[in-house]
Amino acid sequence: MRVEYTGRQIEVTPAIQKFTEDHLKKIRKLLGESIEVHAILTVEKYRHIAEINLKSTSFKLNGLEETNDMYSSINAVLVKIERQALKAKDRKIAKKRKLSSGNSGRPLGVIERNRDNPEQPRIIRSESYAPKPMTVEEAVLEVTSSKSDFLVFRDAESDKVSVVYKRKDGNFGLIEPS
């Protein structure tokens, strides 16, 4: 990971550099080591603006945030970049899975009838799903950013399949195998 800093009307101190690079560790874990980051820090009167341009081998991410404090601007823009990185990585993985898996000869949404007893409820297969490894926090981020009310995922720490869902009270529920 290579990080460049540009300071406009501000001196980029080692403390700011350390703060930024510590927060970039999570993004580096998502995207790998081969990323280039250019941080542009600007101060205009009471406005502290942090802009991050990130180049990976497969995509480019940009974010800009403005607050009254440089550290909170940097933190906010890195949260935004992390969200973008998660979405971009998920799109890339979904595209790979879609190309490689095919649909096993059966179109999606096909109703399988129980031929022995036609009165029994039918099973409607809508899609196949392979749970991907992620932490509980990443799963909650994914549920909040998607239209779905739940997410089936493989817990990266315990390697067990779990479910995170939105509760009616606004909180999130977690179902784990015992």
Image (cartoon, helix red, strand yellow):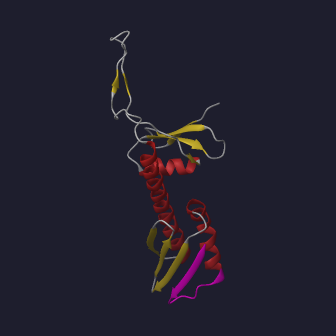
Q: Does the magenta stretch include residue 3?
A: yes
Which corner quadrant of the image does residue 15 belong to? bottom right
Extreme residue toward the front, this view? 105
The image shows residue 101 at horizontal and vertical percentages of 45, 42
- 64 relative to 75 in the view: left or right: left
Q: Residue at x 58, y 42 (%)?
A: 154
- Residue 70: x percent and y percent? 53, 77
Could you say where residue 18 lies in the image, as x and y percent from the top left? 65, 75
Residue drawn at x 40%, y 42% as measured from the top left:
148
> Percent position (x, y) of residue 29?
61, 61
Please give the name of the residue rendered at 59% of the width and 73% of the height, measured from the top-left corner.
20
- Name, please, the residue furthest toward the top: 117
Camera-side residue of 81 and 60? 60
Question: Is residue 148 rendered magenta in the image?
Answer: no
Q: In this view, does 54 lie above or below 84?
A: below
**Left/right of residue 143 with respect to residue 120 in the rendered view:** right
Q: How many marks?
A: 0
Q: Answer with left or right where residue 76 lies relative to residue 112.
A: right
Which span of residues is magenta-colored? 1-14
- Quadrant where the image shows the C terminus: top right
Question: What's the residue at 38%, 30% (across, down)?
Answer: 125
Q: Quadrant of the N terminus?
A: bottom right
